Image (cartoon, rainbow, N blue to C red):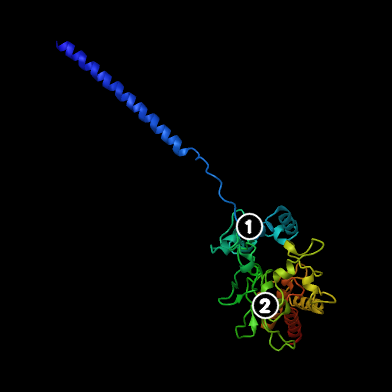
Amino acid sequence: MLLNLHKILNKQISNIMKKFKLISLMMLVASSLMFIQCTSDPIAGPQGLAGIDGQDGSNGTNGTNGVDGTASCIACHNTSHRDAIQTSYDLSGHAAGGAVAYAGSRDSCSRCHSNEGYINYITGKPAVAISSPTPVSCTTCHNKHSTFDFATDGNDFALRNMAPVTLTLTDNYVLDYGDSSNNCVSCHQPRSMAPVDDGTGLYLQANQRFYPHYGGQSTMLEGIQGSFIAGGTTAYPGVGTAKHRTGASCTTCHMGTSSDGLTGSHTFKASFTASVCTTCHTTTVPTEVTGLASNMAILKLKLEDLGLIDPVTGATIVQTTTIPFKTAQALWNYETVYKDGSNGVHNPKYATALISNAVEALDTP
């Protein structure tokens, strides 16, 4: 009897489970139909009334076309533009890197005679010897733009330095050319100071490099760091008054456009036929100051006769005894104008006064 009861219960349970599965299947089908209905396109209703003539909305005004966001970048960052720069740079003294093997590996010289040294210097790192220095190149002077709003802020040409430069040999004298020429001043400044009278009227010239250095162009242009000889008949001009100082700059004269490709741009060689020169020099553009070369030759002979300049090599001769202070000044001024390399053009009145008064000083007992 218990066995029959067990069979009856199993059968009833089986029937209940079948009904439950059927109900579940019906609910799943119903849900699917509801989902299909919700996501299917609605049945289109009748078309609305047409708009009334004269009262329809008018077309809006077309917007102004925007400026290509990369236009200002492409103007410089393209192959043809950069290839022309590289071609001109290859003609420059910077690219030649003649002193990089010697001076570029010396801690006191590397800052201007090697790519690595200059980057260290301009980023505030201490001067160190460079084991494998490389010549000055694009990345020496250029890094990244400080702004891309050239219209408002001006183009900084991604130069590493556009700021005014405090001269290395002074604590407070600042040169500011107001443009990318400040990057040039970073290196084109003296490395030695003019002689100072100790009050005895004599001077011991014991320095083999008794000159400002080959890079003293900025101070020549400014009209400072020469040695003013008292009693000279040629007046020294005021500091910062040279026409090329007030009306030009390093880049306007040395990086202008030229027709032959041998001057200007990144050759850094001044083009005396460029419009930047002919705007002021309407007749002829002087490449040297009148009378300066002859006075330089006279002064050089006098310094050679005094045993201060080697007549063969042109090097300064270290002295073992004191010399008159005015003689030391004359030697310093000769080297200042000579190593400036502009034949006095950077600052004609200043260069003329330095040399003319030096000649007079050596003629006067």
Q: Marks 2 and 1, Cα distance to the nearest angstrom?
A: 78 Å
- From the image, tell me which residue sits under label 2: 222
Please, what secondary structure does the residue beneath circle 2 have?
helix
Q: Residue at x 64, y 85 (%)?
A: 201
Q: Which of the image's four quarters has the N terminus?
A: top left
Please, what secondary structure does the residue beneath circle 1 have?
loop
First in sequence: mark 2 or mark 1?
1
Q: Which mark is residue 304?
A: none
* Amino acid type for the residue under numbered disc 2: Glu
Residue found at the far left of this picture:
1
Q: Seen in the image, is 252 located left or right of residue 34? A: right
- Single out the mark in the foreground, 2 or 1: 1
- From the image, tell me which residue sits under label 1: 53
Q: Which of the image's four quarters has the C terminus?
A: bottom right
Crowding near pointer 1: few (<14 within 10 Å), some, many (20+)?
Answer: few
Residue 211 visible here: no
